[in-house]
Image: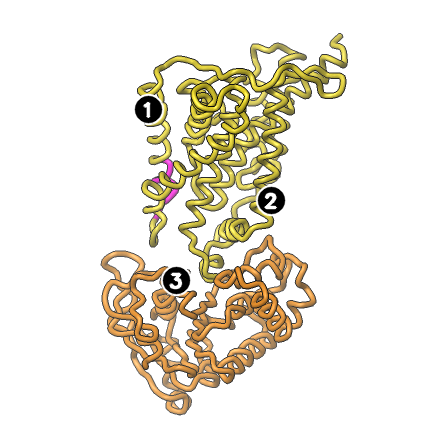
Chain colours: A yellow, B orange
Amino acid sequence: MIDSLLLSQYLIAGIVIGIMYALMAIGITFIYSIMKMINWSMGEFYMMGSYLQYFLVVYFLGANLWFLGIPLSMAVVFVAGMIIQRYLLRPMFVGEMERKDEYATVVTVSLMVFFRNLAVVLAGPNQFAPPDYAGPTHIGPLPVSGNRFVALIGTLVILGLFYLIVKKTWVGKALRGSAQNRVGIQTAGVNVLRVDQIAFGIGVSLAAAAGALLAPIFLVWPENGAIATMKGFEIIVIGGLGSIPGSLLAGLLLGIVESLGSILISPSFRDVYGFILVLGILVVRPTGLFGERQRVA
Amino acid sequence: MPFLTVQNVFCGYYEGIDILQNLSLNVDEGTFIGVIGPNGAGKSTLLKAIFGFLKYRDGKIQFKDREIWDLSPFEIKKLGISYIPQGSNNFPHMTIEENLTLGAWTFRHDKSRIKEGLEKVYDIFPVLSEKKKHKAEFLSGGEAKILSIAKEMISSPNLLLVDEPSAGLAPKIVSYVYEFLRNSQEKGITILLVDQNINQAIDNSQYLYMLEMGTVAMEGSAEIFRENLKDIIRDSLLGT
């Protein structure tokens, strides 16, 4: 039989990876809940974050200052996201426009293709790996890879900051208000287009954080965002679109299921376990764990 | 100085289909103006055009001599105009206090003014004070309407646009809401009320406009409207 030490090691690995997936999913769901559109190029912002981190660490900061790279990458992607939102997405949200979400799909899928190819043009099709963030360490008696440990702590810090911004600041109030009632936030005197822009910036910078934190584990190459996007959407289906606690829980669940499946059954079907979970949830709760049925009219 | 003037406005939701057609009206400072008319006459559209939710295609809307065509709702709010829409403007997953605080967005950096505003609102609407920690989604229809009014009043506007405040409410709440609007006008707030409740509109307004097919079909003092009430109701119902 499998001994409990190995099992708990895999459990921790699953939790670490799950919480990283959740970061992607929270970004997707956050943008959706405010702008009511899905950003299909989320993985490419993840990719941007990983490239930025790699180049910052290798050429500017040095291996010891890797932790500075993460907020810097997030900031750059935040600004890039705001600019992209301003010029490519915002025009659809001015005035009355039908089928915004379909336009958003076309725009963000195009961005996905564009950024993947841009990365090839700028940095070539090669894989890069930044230097390790930290050496192997222990959580209690369990050995864990330093990079994964850093990723876990980093994600917790970022999620904590995200929570504080959304719960405690005026911008956060406006963000929540926009998600709950788009008319009501405008009658209150909030510039809702500005809120959209900030929401998009925050959402994509969460993806960039995931990319930067995972760079030494999953490496840096033009299509590394594809897996992150796929996991992000799996989580959305499991947790329910529009629910941040749902994304967090579903991320953990997905990470643990994949990890335990790998050790209990076979690691070659890693991605399959997640999809089985998705199918199972769809059968039992089609709206996801925390999702609500959309009320029409 | 004219307060709010709407001049020959053409406005609609789709290109080529104007809901408002050459509509003109005047609102003087400190007055209570009613706008009535059958379904589809353009009453709500008028308020949306004034508050910047809809861009008008032609004509002029001026508030205190300032053309507001190029302004968005958040900029119009800053001029001192508040809009109470017919549907909900509340945030269901926030507490009453959070809802009201967001209503104070335009002066969010002035803590003492927010506190003052909250106290004033709680004073006027004790029901909100009792439930300030409750989430808005658990309020009854009447309480939710009071919250949506309070949320737009906390910024102490000069002009209040009100869309069908009585829709779907119990009679007791309805009279409470109109009484509140009347009191507000007595305190100096100008009110532009759009209503299907013709009796209430006539009883509360000083001057009225009746819209038909997107333009003013009749205007006059409340007395004139009261004398012709029967004809007006018949016209309203039949939409002739």
Task: Please tell me whether residue B113 is drawn above or below residue B2 in the rendered image.
Answer: above
Return the chain for callout 1.
A
Q: Position of residue B167 (x, y in %)?
A: 50, 69
One can see residue B236 in this view: yes
Between residues B42 and A95, which one lies in front from this camera angle?
Answer: A95
Disc 2 marks a residue whose amino acid type is: Leu
Disc 1 marks a residue whose amino acid type is: Leu
In the rendered image, the quadrant that contains the N terminus of chain A is top right
**Residue at 39 percent of width and 82 percent of height:** B29
Return the chain for callout 2.
A
**Residue A211: assigned label:** none
Give the image quarter of residue A270. Answer: top right
In magenta, the rendered stretch is A98-105
Residue matched to label 2: A164
**Residue at 53 percent of width and 63 percent of height:** B104
Q: Position of residue B105 (x, y in %)?
A: 50, 60
Q: Position of residue A141 (x, y in %)?
A: 76, 17
Distance of label 3 from label 2 (alpha carbons): 28 Å
Distance of label 1 from label 2 (alpha carbons): 35 Å
| SS label for mark 1 | helix
Is the residue at mark 1 from the same chain as the one at mark 2? yes
Task: Please tell me whether residue A209 is drawn above or below residue B56 in the rendered image.
Answer: above
Q: Main secondary structure of the magenta part?
A: helix
Residue matched to label 1: A118
Q: Tag 2 or tag 1, which sits nearer the N-term?
A: 1
**Residue B75: assigned label:** 3
One can see residue B195 in this view: no
Q: Label 3 crowding class (10 Å Cα cut-off): few <14, some 14-19, many 20+? A: some
| SS label for mark 3 | helix
Residue B137 covered by magenta stretch: no
Q: Position of residue B141 (x, y in %)?
A: 59, 65
Residue A99 covered by magenta stretch: yes
